[in-house]
Image: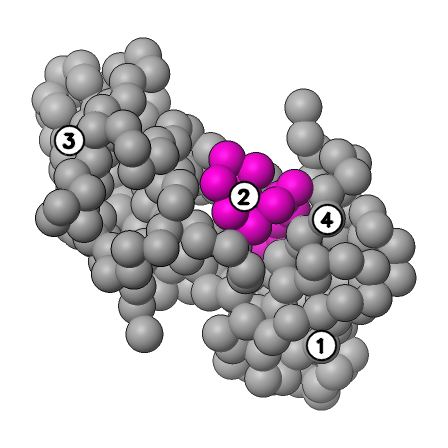
Amino acid sequence: QQQVKQSPQSLIVQKGGIPIINCAYENTAFDYFPWYQQFPGKGPALLIAIRPDVSEKKEGRFTISFNKSAKQFSLHIMDSQPGDSATYFCAASKGPPGLTFGEGTQLTVNP
Amino acid sequence: DVKVTQSSRYLVKRTGEKVFLECVQDMDHENMFWYRQDPGLGLRLIYFSYDVKMKEKGDIPEGYSVSREKKERFSLILESASTNQTSMYLCASSLKTSGVGGTQYFGPGTRLLVL
């Protein structure tokens, strides 16, 4: 049972564009929503995270928007750069066994 | 900084071989995890451990076992490797399993090829 659904599976934007990756969850017990960034040949690394009592969090060019009533959250990348090309995973946690991951989005930012 | 290391970056094994993948974390984290990552399937949890000598099955434990004899070390064992176990294997650790403490820190991964 997939508890966190992520879309799109892949995304191509031009440099300077604003890619948006969306995630939807089912379980209202989730209490923490991180996003991970993974470059080829590397393990995922925490990018930014949000708690459900906050509607938006911004760190540099990365913003999470959180809609608790719709059970959706999204990642926005402002002024995207070719160096942002990576796979992005959303996740949610509510206790053991820990994080439930979305399927991942492969982002390509063209120069 | 949290550091999670995995014993090998690349491994090539034969069908039927016993394979050991080792993971070490240096942050005194209670929880450790093994995932496999395949294109289009995301990260799938194989096993996790919330304490020394404790283990719980994840979503896809078949064909795998684990060992956690020390807090900092978590091993994944393929008792008899098969070609469908060719994959990227990722180890992670976390302080807790919920809230901010549930942030998982990943190792660089081991790419396993079973011939």
Per the image, label 1 sits on a secondary structure element best described as strand
| Residues at discs 2 and 4 both on one chain | yes
Q: Is residue B47 visible?
A: yes
Q: Along the polypeptide, which appears first: circle 2 or circle 1?
A: 1
Identify the residue position indicated by label 3 in the image. Answer: A19
Do residues under tags 4 and 1 come within 8 Å of each other at their CB atoms?
Answer: no
| Position in image of residue B104 (x %, y %) | 55, 43
Q: Quadrant of the N terminus of chain B?
A: top right
Identify the residue position indicated by label 4 in the image. Answer: B30
Question: At 41% from the left edge and 57% from the top edge, which residue is drawn?
Answer: A100
Indicate which label's residue lies in the foreground, 4 or 1. 4
The residues bearing labels 4 and 1 have C-alpha atoms spaced at a distance of: 19 Å
Identify the residue position indicated by label 1 in the image. Answer: B65
Q: Which residues are magenta?
A: B87-103
The residues bearing labels 3 and 1 have C-alpha atoms spaced at a distance of: 40 Å
Identify the residue position indicated by label 2 in the image. Answer: B102
Left or right of B1 on screen, residue B46: left
For mark 1, name the chain. B
Per the image, label 4 sits on a secondary structure element best described as loop
Question: At 27% from the left edge and 28% from the top edge, which residue is drawn?
Answer: A54
| Position in image of residue A62 (x %, y %) | 28, 22
Left or right of A99 on screen, residue B30: right
Question: At 63% from the left edge and 53% from the top edge, which residue is drawn?
Answer: B91
The residues bearing labels 4 and 3 have C-alpha atoms spaced at a distance of: 36 Å
| Residues at discs 2 and 1 both on one chain | yes
